[in-house]
Image (cartoon, rainbow, N blue to C red):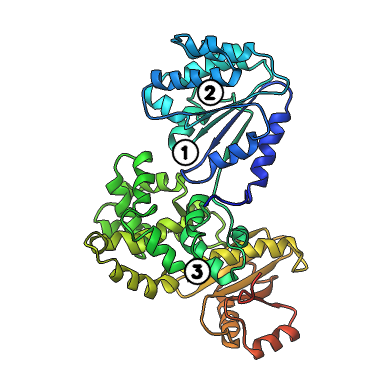
Amino acid sequence: MEMQRFIDREQEMETLQTEYERRGSSLVVLYGRRRAGKTTLISEFIQDKPALFFLASEESEAQNRNVFKEKAAAFIDSVLLRDASVSTWDAIFAAILERAFDRKPIIVIDEFQYIGKSNQAFPSIFQRIWEEQLKDRSVMVILCGSLISMMESQTLAYSSPLYGRRTAQIRLGQIPFRYYGEFFPGSSRKEQIEMYAVTGGVPKYIEVFSQSRDIYRAIQQNILNRSGYLYDEPHFLLQQEVSEVGSYFSIIKAIAAGNHKLSAIASVLEIKATSLTKYLKTLIELDILEREVPVTEENPEKSKRGLYRIKDNYIRFWFAFVYPNMSFIESGNSQIVMDKIRKGLVPGQTAFVYEDVCREKMWELNAEDMWPFHFSKIGRFWDSKTEIDIAALDPEGGNLILGECKYWKDPVDASVLYDLERKTEHVPWERQRRRVWYVLFSVSGFSEELHRLEEQRPDVLLIDDSESD
């Protein structure tokens, strides 16, 4: 089943369109991890425009050049180019530019990094072609790639021959939760949160999951099945980006098991904390990890309270439930793993992801003027005694919003609000002048008493996620 509609990506489409309408030439670098929907985005963008789409492969440069030549010959309808034996890229681009177009042509080189992988001089060759042939013509070139580290070093880094040539760059991220209702029409918000907790906004994962309404069935079919599409996905993802996959796997596994402090990760792996730094930095650059500090910290980079979290929902799920249980799956006992998932998915994964969903919702409420001020920073707060799911700051007006996100079976009662009020004194931010507001999120509604309190108190807001969109 193909995705019925093209969802989200308005901003990226707008950037591409602006570049297309630019007078003269434009060079766009578009990159992001595999399965993020780059090719779909480009296909959607070029469908009504004269475009040459070339997908590079991991074969030799000469083989890639040959395929490009054939694509170019078909694009400009040239038997001459098709039958010619061409030994340089320059000649192919020259042939394309000789043709008169009534609208600006687009040349897409997808998986650009593979050509640079087979010939390290290729970015220099392409830079020369850009300078000598393309730059002063009405043409749009899109260089696209899914190996983040290689795309950055080949096209964006200061040391790259193409540095400073691009007119725009797009790093394609994951799709925000708020679009999940469009992927799963007719589903409740709770069902959407469950799907998001596992697929995490990666279009291709959403697509395979959208064929099943039941989260556990989708997991069984696509993940616990050894020939399933997602069974070994993290291996593929990391294998292409890094050389020592084993070391990276050990680190992610340690974090998935609940070790979030640098010292805790190091002690589980029995290595010095200093030797972890470069691995953690790479995983952050790949959008797999993030370093989180309490939102009230003045200097986040220097903070001693940083915690490492797995940012990618699917990878967090896979390392928590699939990787440690592979021997069961390999020996045909996936039912044992399924039982563990049924027991652990909500407390170990969904409840945690729900906090991210709520923080995303907070930005929407902020834009809708839900409070008589706008916060400019949001995150979590914790110290040695306390943990608060949501802390949003408005430094200008001295307003502080504190919130809790409850993914519970039962309605949330007033004790949660009283508890949150007690925790307030632990938050050191702007004690003297601050005004505190409270927000509670729940997937199972709220007690009568809490509803009464909300009516009486302008500083309390309840967000009920039990109602369908």
Q: Which mark is residue 450?
A: none
Give the residue drawn at x 45%, y 28%. Answer: 56
Which quadrant is the C terminus positioned in?
bottom right
The percent position of residue 110, horizontal first and vertical second, equals 50, 31
**Between marks 3 and 1 in the image, the one whose residue lies nearer the viewer:** 1
Q: Earlier in the sequence, mark 1 or mark 2?
A: 1
Query: Label 3, label 2: how many angstroms apart (C-alpha)?
Result: 44 Å
| Kind of residue at badge 3 | Trp
Q: Secondary structure at mark 3?
A: strand
User: On screen, 101 above or below 193?
Assistant: above
Residue 63: tell me if it is visible: yes
Query: Label 1, label 2: how many angstroms apart (C-alpha)?
Result: 18 Å
How many neighbours does mark 1 have within 10 angstroms: few (below 14), some (14-19), or many (20 or more)?
many
How many neighbours does mark 2 have within 10 angstroms: few (below 14), some (14-19), or many (20 or more)?
many
Residue on which the image places disc 1: 146
Q: Which mark is residue 162?
A: 2
Q: Earlier in the sequence, mark 3 or mark 2?
A: 2
- Is 22 on the left-hand or right-hand side of 55? right
Give the residue drawn at x 49%, y 14%. Answer: 89
Give the residue drawn at x 65%, y 21%. Answer: 139
Q: Earlier in the sequence, mark 3 or mark 1?
A: 1
Q: Residue furthest bottom?
A: 449
